[in-house]
């Protein structure tokens, strides 16, 4: 893939993907009524901002020097706590589950966005010939994979209770 | 094969969830946009998902209660955006306010992901179903969600100056 223009186009698309994630997590942060949910969505939005910064450096480096050096220590992952059965919302949130229409949709959309990003980064890593660029794309795919695990875990924790309590609201 | 009751109920429940996600998202997007036409069209897209969900819920309940339910998907009125318009969702003048990074573009792309997900889901279940009416319902929903997807893609292209 290393034709510079093509690579720059891929990086631009990656920045767009991250910005969509950022905007969505900010919206989720604004709309959820759960305090822990607000914090976690905010940290997910921050992660997407970090990714955008990393990608902007990659873009500049390729454009100016025609090369890129990946530094995993500099671009350290912020680790989400995924050992909890409720990694995004507070456990008390389940007691108010019948009012969780937006939050349940936010989890579904977060899952779709993360799956889409992972697929995009894996494909870009495969098509890429530069070792450091390949490493960076795989690193971002892994990072989004952690977000995905947390979202799926949270959805599993709430799904059945939601359907029972909300009785297929709004239909 | 979807015709085992338990399996069919599971698929219908998932379909209702898919429609509920679409409805909730379009409602939030309608609330967030400052463009009056956008508000109106996004609300009508939410109404479409509400109609789909209500029909699926009726079917789910009937199967669960072993009562009869007449599937009449074609009686639903489509609120599809005018596909002939170059700007089917937002007003033409809204383009001036939108640059890459604007929430409207992000909302259009999220909605595309939701519609693609619905299309994949209904297509897969139409293929698996042997019951003609059910197959026809899922295919009908595929076509409807494709209309939504087409309008969303056209709108993104218009706002980004690709057309």
Image: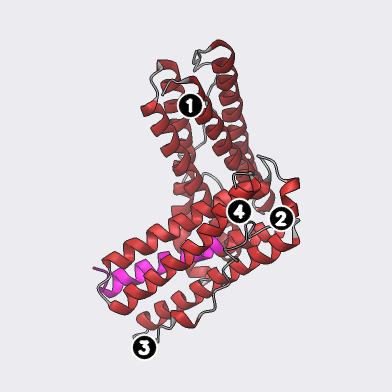
- Give x and y (percent) for residue A163: 48, 67
Please say whether residue B112 is one of the residues in the magenta stretch.
no
Q: Which mark is residue B67?
A: 3
Q: Are marks 2 and 3 in contact (CB under 8 Å)?
A: no
Q: Which residue is mark 2?
A: B92
Query: Residue at coordinates 60% horizontally, 49% vertically from top-left?
Result: B156
Q: Are marks 2 and 4 in contact (CB under 8 Å)?
A: no
Magenta stretch: give its range. B1-22
Q: Which residue is mark 4?
A: B155
Are discs 2 and 3 both within one chain?
yes
- Please rate how many residues cluster around mark 1, counting C-alpha atoms within 10 Å: few if below 14, some from 14 to 19, many from 20: few
| Numbered disc in front, either 4 or 3 | 4
Are discs 3 and 1 both within one chain?
no
Are discs 4 and 3 both within one chain?
yes
Choose between B160 and A160: the one closer to the eye. Answer: B160
Find numbered disc 2 in the image and state the secondary structure of the residue it sits on: helix
Residue A163 in view (yes/no): yes
Are discs 1 and 4 both within one chain?
no
Query: Residue at coordinates 59% horizontally, 71% vertically from top-left?
Result: B47
Q: CA distance from mark 2 to mark 1?
A: 31 Å
Find numbered disc 1 in the image and state the secondary structure of the residue it sits on: helix
| First along the sequence among labels 4 and 3 | 3
């Amino acid at each position: 893939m290393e034709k510079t223009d093509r690579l720059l186009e891929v990086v631009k698309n990656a920045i767009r993907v991250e910005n969509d994630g950022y905007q969505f997590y900010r919206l989720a942060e604004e709309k959820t009524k759960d305090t822990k949910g607000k914090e976690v969505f905010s940290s997910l939005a921050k992660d997407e901002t970090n990714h955008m910064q990393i990608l902007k450096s990659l873009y500049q480096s390729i454009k100016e020097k025609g090369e890129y050096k990946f530094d995993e220590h500099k671009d350290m992952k912020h680790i989400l706590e995924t050992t909890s059965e409720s990694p995004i919302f507070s456990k008390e949130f389940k007691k108010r589950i019948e009012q969780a229409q937006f939050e349940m949709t936010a989890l579904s959309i977060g899952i779709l966005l993360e799956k889409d990003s992972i697929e995009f980064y894996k494909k870009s890593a495969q098509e890429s010939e530069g070792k450091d660029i390949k490493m960076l794309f795989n690193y971002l795919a892994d990072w989004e994979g952690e977000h995905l695990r947390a979202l799926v875990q949270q959805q599993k924790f709430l799904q059945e209770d939601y359907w029972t309590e909300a009785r297929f609201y709004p239909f | 094969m979807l015709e085992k009751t338990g399996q069919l109920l599971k698929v219908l429940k998932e379909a209702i969830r898919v429609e509920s996600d679409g409805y909730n998202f379009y409602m939030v997007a309608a609330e967030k946009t400052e463009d009056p036409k956008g508000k109106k069209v996004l609300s009508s897209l939410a109404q479409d998902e509400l109609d789909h969900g209500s029909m699926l819920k009726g079917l789910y309940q009937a199967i669960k209660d072993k009562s009869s339910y007449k599937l009449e998907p074609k009686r639903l009125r489509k609120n599809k955006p005018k596909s002939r318009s170059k700007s089917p969702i937002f007003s033409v003048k809204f383009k001036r306010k939108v640059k890459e990074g604007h929430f409207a573009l992000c909302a259009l792309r999220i909605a595309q992901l939701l519609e693609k997900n619905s299309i994949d889901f209904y297509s897969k279940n139409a293929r698996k179903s042997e019951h003609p009416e059910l197959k026809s319902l899922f295919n009908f929903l595929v076509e409807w969600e494709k209309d939504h997807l087409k309008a969303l893609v056209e709108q993104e292209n218009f706002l980004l100056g690709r057309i």
